[in-house]
Image: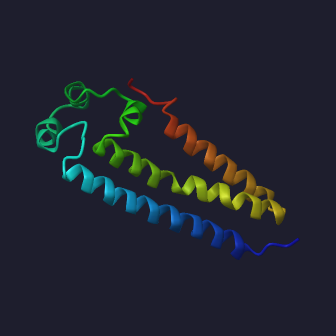
Amino acid sequence: MDVSPDVAQKRYARWLAWGTRLGLALLVLGFIAYILGLAPHVPIERLPALWQRPASELLEHSGLQPGWHWASLVHRSDMLVIATIGFLASCSIASLVAVIPAFARNRENVFVVICILQVAVLLLAASGLFAGGH
């Protein structure tokens, strides 16, 4: 069964478009909740003072820890905004996974391997396993 290159391109574009639309909608909602002061972890009034500090002090004064600790606070409006930014950054991962079957059906194994490697690299980068300085 031959699958034209258009199929993979259109599938990638469709997944990316829907992911970014959803992400942007969530980002706007989370930002509005944060601006309205709905259960933030760090009140907006404290931000200017915290932004002047080195990262280690900012984390200490805001009660956060490095890495994925913020994910446990996603119920807070400011952390919801951070989670949404993470969702937007990961939209390309879902899009890559979505095109793998189209490439496989067309026996374009090089593209299948490239997509798998890209997904692996992106997931490893997001995991923080190779983060320096912690």
Quarter holding the N terminus is bottom right
Residue 72 percent location from the top left of the image = 40, 32
- The answer to which image quadrant residue 16 occupies is bottom right
Q: How is the image coloured?
A: rainbow
Residue 50: x %, y % from top left:
16, 36
The residue at the far front in this view is: 38
Decide if residue 26 is on the left or right side of residue 56.
Answer: right
- Residue placed at 13% from the left, 38% from the top? 46
Q: Is residue 76 left or right of residue 14?
A: left
Percent coordinates x, y for residue 91 in the rendering: 52, 56
- Please state which of residues 6 and 98 is positioned toward the viewer in this rendering: 98
Task: Identify the residue shown where x is 83% and y is 63%.
Answer: 105
The mark total stands at 0
Q: Position of residue 64 (x, y in %)?
A: 30, 28
- Quadrant the C terminus occupies: top left
Name the side, left or right, on which 109 lies relative to 54: right
In this view, 72 is above or below 98: above
Q: Nearer the viewer, residue 20 or 66?
A: 20
Q: Quadrant of residue 79?
A: top left
Name the residue nearer the viewer: 131 or 96. Answer: 96
